[in-house]
Image: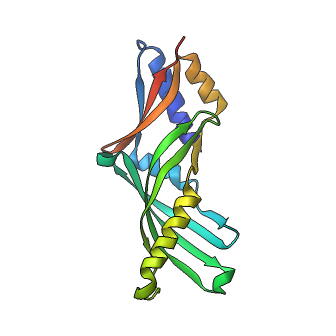
Amino acid sequence: MALLGGVVAALLGACAALSPGERTVRISEARLGEIIARQFPLNRRYLEVFDVAISAPQVTLLPESNRIATQFNYSTGSFLLGAREFAGTLDLSYALRFEPSDHTVRLTDVRAEGVQVPGVPPAYQRQANRLGGLLTENLLHDFVVHRLSQDDLQTAAGWGYQPGAFKVVPGALVLQLNPVAR
């Protein structure tokens, strides 16, 4: 998580010498994948019924829809299912947003694009996909992928900038830095 903040702080320093106006920070697809991977594996209990483990994120940028796609490995089980555990892959897409109240970068508009549940009989595959999609969309809604440090935010404000919107472009995620009204 410190990596994104370090990139922002370093580039803000370069912006300080330039004329006022909007600036951007580019984060490569590979770098974004590293940042997101640091938040996993994720192990959570959902609705006090399902134990869910999500790991091994593989990030792909979708600039045509301003979204990010990520494929994860998952496993889930429940005391309701006995000792049976299901494992497979999960394909998500989402956008990112900066939350100024706690200085975090969060997943938003999370969509389960596909849930592969090997070993489930074909008659139940559709229901398993739907349940898996609902579980993960709810589990990862507003999930924090990065927290900017107070020092980074104060440095940015001192140079007259604050984090703005994210935009997915070919090969990179771009963070807009907006001038602070003075």
Q: Residue at x 42, y 87 (%)?
A: 123
In the picture shown, does residue 93 fall above or below 118?
above
> Relative to the observer, which residue lies in front, 138 or 31?
138
Residue 48 % position (x, y): 70, 69
Q: Residue at x 36, y 50 (%)?
A: 61
Residue 36 % position (x, y): 51, 52
Question: With 29 as the anchor, is 5 left or right in this view?
Answer: right
Question: With 79 as the anchor, is 108 left or right in this view?
Answer: left
In the picture shown, does residue 157 fall above or below 102?
above
Q: How is the image coloured?
A: rainbow
Q: Mark yes or no: residue 1 visible.
A: no
**In the rendered image, which quarter is residue 15 located in?**
top left
Mark count: 0
Quadrant where the N terminus sits is top right
In the picture shown, does residue 171 fall above or below 153?
below
Question: With 154 as the anchor, is 96 left or right in this view?
Answer: left
Residue 16 % position (x, y): 48, 16
Quadrant where the C terminus sits is top right
Q: Residue at x 59, y 22 (%)?
A: 155
> Relative to the observer, which residue lies in front, 125 or 67?
125
In the picture shown, does residue 174 fall above or below 52?
above
> Relative to the observer, which residue lies in front, 79 or 1?
79
Q: Mark yes or no: residue 158 visible.
A: yes
Residue 135 % position (x, y): 55, 66
